[in-house]
Image: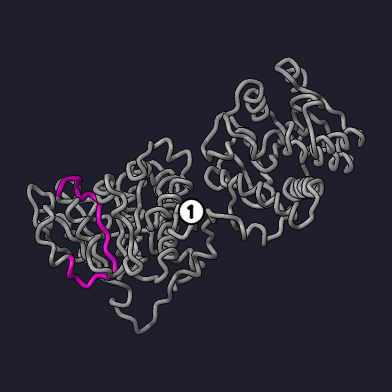
Amino acid sequence: MRVLTPAQMREAERRTIEDHGVPSLRLMERAGEQVVAAIEAHLAGRPGAAAVLCGRGNNGGDGWVVARLLGERDRDVLGVLFGTAGDVAGDARTNLERARQAGIPIVEVTGEDDWRRCRPRLDARLVVDAILGTGQKRPLTGLLATVADDVNAMTGTVVSIDLPSGILSDLSRRADPCLRPVLTVTLGAPKLALALRPEPAGQVVVADIGIPAAVIAKLDAPRIGLLAAGEMRSSIPSRHPESHKGDYGRVAIVAGSRGKTGAACLAGLGALRAGAGLVTVATPASCLDVVAREPEYMTLGLPDENGVATGNGLDALLAGPWDVMAAGPGLGTGRGCRTIVQALLDRPARGPLVLDADALTACAEQPERLRGHPDAPVVITPHPGEMARLAATGVADVQRDRVGVAHRFAADHGVHVVLKGARTVIAAPDGAVWINTTGNPGMAKGGSGDVLTGVVAAWLAQVRDVGAAVALAVHLHGLAGDLAVRETGETGLLARDIARRLGPAVVELAGGGRDR
């Protein structure tokens, strides 16, 4: 299901009204009907008394429809308007008056004193949050900040319409305070803020309010989707009984330096556990004895000085029979790394190239070098700091607009971007964006990204479609972390625990049986 930005949602509503002849009042009525249906389906048996908290805009208009419909079901309903009736216009005003005519008592709250008098009447009720919805662009302050804290402390059940008030719809970043409902009924399509920051929203239900699927399909980029298990399951290739190791790809990983040999080991282990047939880890020659501790992957020594690859003597590496190459984990940030990365980018087009960590730092001053070739697509896997350097912006700017930054960089530079972090964002050069739903805070530990580098390289060697391979790799990496954390807990989770659960993650994604 496609995830929409606030601007895309407004455009979808406009096209539904203007091009398909659906009256705006009908959309608002349908929204209220669907919210009430979700309340009855998901909160059966809860207390009948309800309070509907409404702002002055269209989210409040949806709330007045809900208040009227709950009243028609013989619930004891109180309507709370943050503002005065004179502040409300358009369809929202029409539905405010309809609720009033239906006998819904309405309290106007314009300041702290009004709220203090109203607040005791809300306790132990179902509270419907229709204050701000997707129209919010700044954190809650003053009266509404007090309202959020007070409602969260009440004993009743909270349901939000579209977005919990306090969640910033345009910046998609965490806001505090915000309402924390048990149920959020989002209208028409999933919203970007919910996809990136689902924690405060409780259970999320997507309500069909009558926007045609064709309207959503024709919206401009970015085309954002959530990685769903069903779609990922279909990407797992079958293993033929008569297959051999060459059928599952030859992967070369250029990684490691003195003091950072673990990065090379973890990347190699990730590639092996993700199913690559043959894995070679190229590392400084003086580090070979340490890196070669995993018997299943091969090693290739690179000329080095003081444990750091110099960038000389790359003929064997560049001439190797690799289907996929990856570089960066623990490689160092000096001239040798820059020389290696440039050589990999300039090599004859032959298979995908994955760049991570130090390889991305080497490209920060000239990100235009990253542009891939149709026969040699480039996949980059930056964390927010690396993304900020590549995009010549700040980390805070990246985190405020993770989807936008990844989408623009992928389109402008012709690369596939895996922007790591909570809810990893995957952006393709053609404008497609995916948000991953697996993973947990225990994975925020050194080495997790190194494992991911190997996992991405391995699946690129096994799945022809680059976008599908990258999405599958990211999803399985997070799922392996989720499996591992059940045993280790978040605090004790190590990167190698993630690598060791990659096989079970494939089994689980495939449906609980043997992997395909």
Residue bearing the label numbered 1 = 436
- Is 352 left or right of 190, judged from the image as shown? left
Instruction: Based on the picture, tell me whether residue 410 belongs to the magenta stretch.
Output: no
Quadrant of residue 97 in the image? top right
**Residue 480: percent from the left, percent from the top?**
41, 56
Q: Is residue 492 visible?
A: no
On screen, residue 320 above or below 97:
below
The reply, left or right, for residue 195 in relation to residue 383 is right
Residue 317: image location, x then y, percent: 17, 65
Q: Residue at x 70, y 50 (%)?
A: 13
Q: Is residue 371 visible?
A: yes
As drawn, 218 above or below 101: below
**Screen quadrant of the C terminus:** bottom left
Q: Residue at x 61, y 44 (%)?
A: 6
Q: In the visual, does 209 lie left or right of 336?
A: right
Camera-nearest residue between 242 and 45: 242
Q: How is the image coloured?
A: one colour
Task: Assign a secondary structure to mark 1.
Answer: loop
Residue shown at the point (73%, 15%) measured from the top left: 113
**What number of labels is visible?**
1
Q: Nearer the viewer, residue 415 or 205?
A: 415
Residue drawn at the location 86% of the way across and 38% of the way down: 75
Residue extent of the magenta highlight: 318-335
Assign the N terminus to one quadrant of the image. Answer: bottom right
Q: Is residue 249 above or below residue 87?
A: below
x and y, in percent, of residue 178 in the image? 60, 32
Q: Main secondary structure of the magenta part?
A: loop
